[in-house]
Image: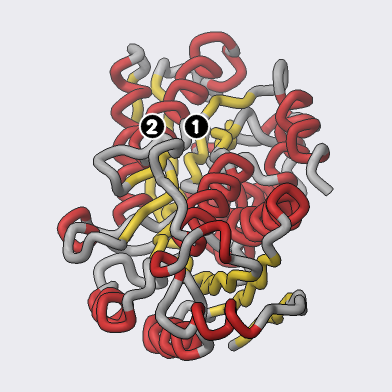
Amino acid sequence: MKLGKRLIVCVISLGLIVGSLSGCGNDVQEEEVKSIKIGVTVYDQYDTFVSQLIDRFNVYASEKEAETGVAINIEVYNAADSQPTQNSQVETMMGDGCNVVCVNLVDRTEPKTIIDMAEKNNVPVIFFNRELVAEDLERWEQLYYVGAKAFESGIMEGEIAADVFKNDSAADKNGDGIFQYIVLEGEAGHQDAIVRTEYSVSTIIERGVEVEKLNYAIANWNRAQAQTKMTQMLGEYGNKIELVLANNDDMALGAIDALKAAEIAPERWPVVVGIDGTNVGLEAVKNGEMAGTVYNDKEGQAKAMLDLAYELSTGGSLAGLDMEDGKYIRLPYAKVGVEDVEEYIEKSEMMP
């Protein structure tokens, strides 16, 4: 499904047209380039974090245009959680002459078709936000990844939860000295979901807090699904639930929706912690509904992706980009609590 197209038309000399026919981004010199085309496909347009990242990406593209005078045309597609659909979208974008394609993989274990197309057409691919297997990224030299290290977010989520238990006696509702918890996981078998869960729980334990797992549920990063799952677990465990560890803010907010629908007084709510620092997640921290979130730097990732795509499309140098092993650009996470949430809200609001 194609979301839309932002086309910027510019006058190009006959000499440039002839030159550009020789190949994609890396085959022309930067001073000759007047226009580039970047294709983007996301696994799900309704994922709040991904949607906000793409908004930032478009903002930075406009800024880069103003800075360089190079017209940047962006095509964005929604794969609607279908890997075959996404494969077809990538094929279309390469056929349309995109200089580089940015892919938010539906299935991180199935990038082969896209990689094979990229190598065949000599079009660089930037995978982002949903990290593929490291061995796959090594299959061709023009494959890159922009994102963050999932385990860092799990550690920080665990630190937030442990600090609440240690500093607020009300968090231990039954007074047994044990944090009874449930987990709302992103996807079955998804590496980021597994890592976020594993490290959040192990970090709580490492910080000296005893825990007891009551249950977990797969909610596919989705707020509505999380509300349904949380409602079911409230029916089973009621006020025994003292902590909700959610793999992202949307699922944390789904848990809060369930608490509200059950008409449970806020002072009786379990501690709820999320990950991503989306706008709605930050507001929930500000108003005290969430104990905290882990900020996933969407602004930094969007800018890094745009800068990398620009250099690849114009034949520029990657030397000025902060890359690991010539393949990875990773932005750090940050813990966000009520004491510093305004700083991150302002950071988000600074963007048009």
Q: Residue furthest front?
A: 15
Residue at the image point whose x is 61% and y is 54% from the top: 49
Residue at the image point whose x is 74% and y is 33% from the top: 347
User: Residue 91: x, y in percent?
Assistant: 42, 88
Bin the neighbour count of mark 1 within 10 Å (Cα to Cα): few under 14, some 14-19, many 20 and up: many
User: Residue 287: x, y in percent?
Assistant: 80, 32
Residue at the image point whose x is 42% and y is 54% from the top: 185
Q: Is residue 269 above or below residue 228?
A: above
Residue at the image point whose x is 49% and y is 25% from the top: 161
In the depicted view, which residue is nearer to us: 84 or 119? 119
Can residue 135 be seen here? The reply is: yes
User: Residue 170: x, y in percent?
Assistant: 61, 18
In the depicted view, which residue is nearer to us: 103 or 236? 103
Check residue 152 in the rendering and tell me which mark sits there, or answer none: 2
Mark 1 residue element: loop
Bin the neighbour count of mark 2 within 10 Å (Cα to Cα): few under 14, some 14-19, many 20 and up: some
Question: What is the CA distance from the residue labelled 1 to the residue labelled 2?
Answer: 7 Å
* Three-letter code for the amino acid on which mark 1 is drawn: Tyr
Count of numbered labels shown in the rendering:
2
Q: Which scheme is used to colour this image of the protein?
A: secondary structure
Q: Is residue 44 above or below residue 3?
A: above
* Marks 1 and 2 in Cβ contact (< 8 Å): yes
In the depicted view, which residue is nearer to us: 68 or 184? 68
Left or right: where 99 falls relative to 137: right
Q: Quadrant of residue 171?
A: top right
User: Residue 257: x, y in percent?
Assistant: 70, 53
Left or right: where 122 falls relative to 141: right
In the depicted view, which residue is nearer to us: 5 or 35? 35
Check residue 333 in the rendering and tell me which mark sits there, or answer none: 1
